[in-house]
Amino acid sequence: MNANINKSYTKYYIIAWVFGLIFYFLDYVIRSAPAVMIPELSQNFSVDNIRLVTIIGTYYYTYSTCSLIAGIALDRFGAKYSLFAGALILGIGCLLFLISSQFSGIVGRLFQGAGCAFAFPGCVYLASKGFSAKSLATAIGFTQCLGMLGGTAGQFMVGPWIEKGMNINHFWLVIGIFTIIVAFALWFITPANNMEKPTENIQKKQSLLSPYKTVFSNPQSWLCGIISGLLFAPTTIFAMTWGVSFFQKDRALDFHTATISSAMVAFGWVFGCPLLGYITDKINKRKPVLIFGALFMILALLQLLFFPNLLPSKISMFLLGVASGAAMIPYSIIKEANPDNVKGSATGAINFITFGVTTLLNPLFSRLYGQTLGNAIDKTVHFQQAGLFWIIGISIAILASFLLKETGEGTIINSKKFAKE
């Protein structure tokens, strides 16, 4: 009887997932857009560029911590209320950017990070309800594909708008209102939690932090988060925050070319995430694709740093983006390495660890290379050293990948094991 009820609501979860994708698309537009309006935001908040980058980076403080809250909310209350709250908070965070003060900028960015923390876990949660286990990695890859398409739009489209004289307040007003509209659409479309009573009853028997105790006590969860974080960082910190400035000042590219080059990483994700997700589902193995993707990231960076005339920078960054789609594979692994009744918490946990790594690396990279940007005697060497910083991180991720247990072949076995427990 319960199976029939769940099956009848599958199509509603898929429709809700589509609207969740819009939320996630907006997440990445809002995450990446500040990179192409640094001078305008600096003037609006009356701060210098370094201080502005610090304000932009506060996004990851709330994004990482609220990922845990999002996981708990999804497991205990379902997607309806969780996604509505997240999208509403995100919209308010955008509107706060309309106020010309440093305080409103910080609070707005913190709100943006907190709201966005619900987008991806919510989409994965809805996908797990609407799609079969055999196509879950593909669905997750397509979800990230749409997110990174938003990241591309946040730079590739917004950059030219700014260049043509668009007022940044107009941008934040429109995207803030649209995000709030999406929030209410999610409220009306997503099935209520009373459709998930069996899961709800199980959760009532558990303490609030019980799912995270399960997830964080598993060493595989930590490995997944650290690996994903180290593979994500070159895109979230370098391409989406510093990329335009580095290409302009170290490589002497004009604003338009620098913007396109940086945006091509996110555009590469549009193809890389679903492609690598599909390959892992097809061969039923996770680790080989993960390691291959990381190695290809290193090759793309080496070419960009030391053989820049071999390929245009936008092609190099596109290839980097395609390969870095491997950062999503640990999101499948962590779900397969943990019990089914902690789906939301597992995604929240890996988001917390992943962007916790980003939160730690962002100020470190800013201190080592951001503060010297534009002042380096040898700009080519400065650019190369900045790139080697990310190559070291990717290399550590590859070494950590060998410690992961392969879950692709044992997914069914693991599910049966957890069901017995």
Image (cartoon, rainbow, N blue to C red):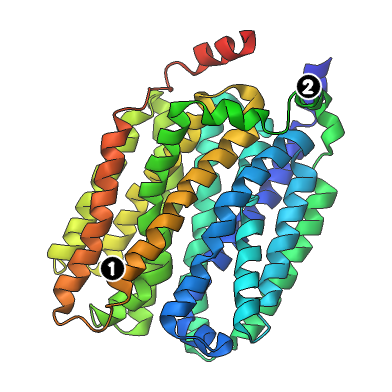
Can you see residue 122? no
Tag 1, which secondary structure? helix
The label shown at residue 320 is none
Q: Position of residue 62 (x, y in %)?
A: 59, 57
The three-letter amino acid code for the residue at tag 1 is Leu
**Sequence-wise, which precedes: disc 1 or disc 2?**
2
* Point 65% across, 71% down: residue: 108
What secondary structure is marked by label 2? Answer: loop
- Structural distance between the alpha carbons of marks 1 and 2: 49 Å
**For this view, does 164 lie left or right of residue 363?**
right
Residue 107 visible, this orientation: yes
**Could you tell me residue 144's position as x and y percent?**
51, 48
Which one is in front, 341 or 319?
Answer: 341
Q: Nearer the viewer, residue 215 or 167?
A: 215
The residue under the point 59% across, 41% down is 348
Q: Quadrant of the C terminus?
A: top right
Q: Residue at x 59, y 84 (%)?
A: 168
Q: Which mark is residue 205?
A: 2
From the image, tell me which residue sits under label 1.
Answer: 368
Q: Is residue 27 above or below residue 230?
A: below
